């Protein structure tokens, strides 16, 4: 029998084992917890560590355990742990001395214990590892829909239209050219959607004349996932930068440039330098690069370890002031990119405007409304509302009774 | 009356409310704290949470509070919290049990409590959110001055000079070409300024023959903001990389290359391949890329969460050894970029040398002095001084009397 | 005498000093600890802070100290601190009240105290700052060997061979072209080596029919440094991206393109557009960029502060699912890069195939084995083994007796 076990391990009955140790680690499935009821007397005063993990989200175990382990003396010392990311162990418990001893044991195993408060928090921790990026769901689906829509929009304009009208095969635009239209559009739209809910909230507060009424649920949820929207937008911006920098090493681009030069040399045509074109081209590239630089800065400050080291004034400064500056630069980048062609009817293909024209709608709307909101007269009213002033206290009273009208 | 309140809320007198609860959260302006004096008896032994935020930096509130809340039994349990970055709550308090309970409450609200020690620290925490990047001020203004100076320096050489002498419009250089001269210069100068104070400190210690005398204040302050200087330098290096990679898609560059090729094709001139030019061009590009790569590494290790996981030997290795290697690579990149043209008098414009020649002064100085300092004989003396040895103990004695001579 | 000291400092005998203070900080070398034995009576009940740092790794000091400071009342309150990264102070101690007081002192000095448990942990902490990146050693040497090998391999094929056969000087390929072959090969190989141990472990478990036998030591060590291997691979991928994006501004590339265009213009040869070439060229570039994007995502999630905010399911999803997707994209990038030339015998130089063909061996092997392992029948068996099922319990019994046969 003993040959089954590693050196130093002993096999004994439940009660003997419980009697012999101070710290008891329970590592069996919760279906088999019944035997604990028989041991209540022996367990009295011992530290009980429950390392079982919850497998279904709504399987509220802590109540069960309260049922099985009745004596409060034991329950008081029950400690719930949960292995996270291989090296961190979250620990809950009501008795701080017992917790201290368990944390020492965890440390001696080379792991980092993290005190997560009393047993009240244990239930939350147990459910914690079972959700997969819950805050990322809405931003992820939204950006997937945006990408698919604009991809097919561009395919219609740039691949199907030339094929139908001129029988030209333009499918070679699929791997890089068309994604490089979709990525900046998705980035700009998502970035604008980060700042849209704040603007809507301000309008709602101005309209209601009070800050004491709750926002609708969709607005609350939208405001909570702004960081995720912004990070996905940064991802698209990064891809746009990569796809743009790679342009001059593409076969198609090299062939086009080479062909144009050869034709020019053979026909001996002149190609005068245009200072305006140079200004326009350099300006939109420079605006884009500065916008991307600020965007990367925003992304870095949203890293948990960085945002923990800045205070709220700094955080608000970076996320609000720098964020709006990024939005302004990226919108200007798109506007100057359009340049003279912008809204030119000759750009319409099957009555469809260029994709970047559509991409400009939301950012421009956000910027215009924001510009109106920071006009001194409106900004003053908004500030007063946010400091607690109410235009119509009676109105807000009825709202607290649950009569919302939006 | 009750219709004004959300479900579950009750309205009662101060003393009733205080008597009924264990934890009392005070969320009113500090001007109205007077009523607390009347409640001292009821508050005895309760946990008092003060969530008010300081609004002026030098408004030393803790003393006021000591005045209002006299009984030590209350004061002992007063806990100061401060909401940071929306999810972290800094908590100060002398009574650890009371603190534990408040931390549980904070956790149940979905926030992360951070134990910041006893009430002594409360005052510091209250002033914390009111400063905007205090350590970044000097590096920010310095880099702004550097950028403006070198921008106008390059404008004089590359836009005004050709206009005055040849009536040529070169303003198209403003959006990209000239910034792409300013950014690398600012990056290299700021990077050198990160290592200059360490070199000055070593010279001071060698000159004084002791490490027991304080450095002048400006040197202390400079040494404290080296990380910020380095990160701003990294920002400029990142912009320089972006502005450089974008070169081949610029209209001006494409036009120039196209024009040159067409002329060559028409005149049928030969353009022999020069191995030396290829070596020089590739070397300075490779040096720059390796330098940028190490620079990014330095930036990543200066992230709080990364620098917390390395030990001080690793941190010193990365920040000192890798840092100097980065400085050497970036200086070499600039030197090889200059190549044969370097210090060529034909490059002088209105007696002004190229901007990058000026940019090389500080980094080369730092590297030469550092090279002298690590010569065995000097390094040995410096090591002994840093381990506590003094060349002239009497001299240091007079210094401790306050007679500094620098 | 007093002129030697800063204001507020006092000089007194050991016992007087010990008697006068509650917290005693010992900042002398451990060779001089003898005097503490004389003070045992005075030190009784005081908090003793030992700030000395260990200088040799196996200099087990805590035992010495137990010898010198015999009374348990003192020893109980001894607190060991260790300065890390200039702002964090690790603190060990058995008495939590004493620890609390020392943490307050540390905080008042502007440093962040980190509670590292009881004195048992002190020894580990003292040795902590003396190792230089211990987990990085194997990945670092492995990647150095890979780089040197592939560098000389490419030099033989691309510099020495043309020189020997055609007397052509191709040394200008050394600074950028050849490194840009070595970096992607190193990146892809190291990325594959991140996933190889997991595949080997699965095969071992399937062969043994149990998860209860330990893996060989080399496999254990390999699995522990997968993160480091992956980060070094990311570094090489980053360099590959930089070295690739820089291609169009290289003198050699510009000269080649210019020369080709001039020749074409003079001879008036046509250069028809090939849709297939465009597809192949754009596809491998797009695959590479998407692979690099996912690789950067993997790198960001491995930052300590980010990986702490995701739960284990999210971490496993990112590191396993996204990791394999990255490996697939990067392998496909290399395969499509080879394109039609792949395994073409005309590419052999002195019987040596192109370097990227060798680079594909490990990633393709890993992907093929992984593909076999996730076939439903094999995956089911593996899952059962990992949940504790054993094919041959007797076999595993003998193994526990120490008779391993691998």
Image (cartoon, coloured by chain):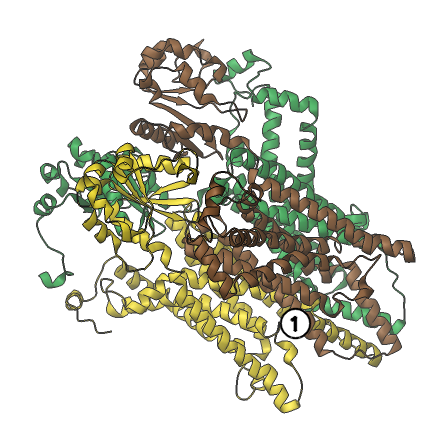
Chain colours: A brown, B yellow, C green
- Report the residue marked by disc 1: B276
Q: Is residue A13 left or right of residue B46?
A: right
Q: Is B182 in front, or is A396?
A: A396
Residue A112 drawn at (x, y percent): 40, 35
What residue do we see at 56% from left, 37% from top?
Answer: A134
Q: Nearer the viewer, residue A357 or B324?
A: A357
Q: Image point 29% across, 69% down: which residue?
A: B204
Residue C349, above or below A23: below
SS state under label 1: helix
Visible residue check, residue B204: yes
Question: Would residue C288 be found to the left or right of residue B376 on screen?
Answer: right
Measured as percent of width and height from the top left, residue C10 is found at 11, 55
| Chain letter belonging to callout 1 | B
x then y, percent, for residue A338: 72, 65
The residue furthest bottom is: B165
Quadrant in which the N terminus of chain A is drawn: top left
Work out whether C113 lies above or below B141.
Answer: above
Q: Is residue B360 above or below residue B317?
A: below
Residue B196: quarter of image: bottom left
Q: Is residue C110 visible?
A: no
- Name the image quarter holding the C terminus of chain A: top right
| Image quadrant where residue C114 sits | top left
Residue in view at x 91 percent, y 57 percent: A165
Give C352 or A362, whichever is nearer the viewer: A362
Q: Position of residue A231 (x, y in %)?
A: 57, 49
Name the quadrant containing residue A384: bottom left
- The local crowd at label 1, few if under 14, some if 14 to 19, many if 20 or more residues have their Cα within 10 Å, is few
* Near-viewer residue (B253 or C164): B253
Please give the count of numbered marks on the rendered protein: 1
Question: Horizontally, is B255 left or right of C45 in the view?
Answer: right
Q: Indicate left or right for A350 with B353 as reference.
A: right
């Amino acid at each position: 029998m003993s040959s089954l076990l590693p050196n130093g391990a002993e096999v004994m009955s439940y009660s003997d084992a419980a009697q012999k140790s101070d710290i008891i680690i329970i590592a069996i499935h919760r279906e088999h917890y019944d035997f604990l009821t028989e041991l209540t007397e022996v367990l009295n005063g011992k530290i009980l560590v429950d390392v079982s993990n919850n497998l279904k989200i709504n399987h509220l175990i802590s109540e069960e355990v309260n049922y099985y382990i009745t004596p409060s003396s034991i329950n008081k010392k029950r400690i719930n742990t949960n292995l996270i990311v291989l090296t961190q162990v979250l620990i809950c418990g009501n008795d701080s001395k017992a917790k201290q001893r368990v944390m020492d044991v965890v440390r001696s195993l080379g792991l980092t214990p993290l005190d997560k408060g009393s047993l009240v928090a244990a239930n939350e921790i147990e459910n914690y590892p079972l959700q997969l990026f819950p805050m990322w769901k809405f931003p992820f689906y939204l950006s997937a829909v945006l990408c698919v829509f604009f991809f097919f929009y561009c395919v219609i304009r740039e691949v199907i239209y030339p094929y139908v009208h001129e029988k030209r095969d333009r499918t070679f635009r699929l791997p890089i050219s068309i994604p490089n239209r979709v990525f900046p559009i998705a980035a700009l739209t998502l970035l604008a959607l980060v700042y849209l809910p704040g603007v809507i909230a301000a309008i709602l507060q101005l309209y209601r004349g009070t800050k004491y009424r709750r926002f609708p649920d969709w607005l609350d949820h939208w405001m909570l996932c702004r960081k995720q929207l912004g990070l996905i937008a940064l991802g698209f911006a990064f891809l746009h930068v990569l796809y743009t920098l790679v342009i001059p090493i593409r076969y198609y681009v090299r062939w086009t440039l080479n062909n144009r030069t050869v034709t020019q040399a053979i026909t001996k045509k002149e190609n005068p330098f245009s200072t305006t074109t140079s200004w326009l081209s350099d300006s939109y590239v420079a605006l884009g690069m500065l916008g991307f630089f600020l965007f990367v800065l925003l992304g870095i400050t949203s890293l948990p370890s960085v945002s923990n080291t800045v205070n709220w004034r700094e955080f608000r400064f970076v996320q609000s002031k720098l964020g709006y500056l990024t939005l302004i630069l990226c919108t200007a980048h798109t506007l100057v990119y359009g340049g003279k062609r912008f809204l030119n009817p000759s750009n319409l293909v099957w009555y469809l405007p260029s994709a970047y024209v559509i991409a400009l709608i939301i950012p421009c709307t956000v910027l215009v409304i924001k510009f109106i909101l920071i006009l001194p007269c409106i900004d003053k009213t908004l500030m007063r509302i946010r400091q607690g002033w109410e235009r119509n206290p009676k109105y807000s009273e009825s709202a607290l009774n649950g009569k919302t009208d939006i």
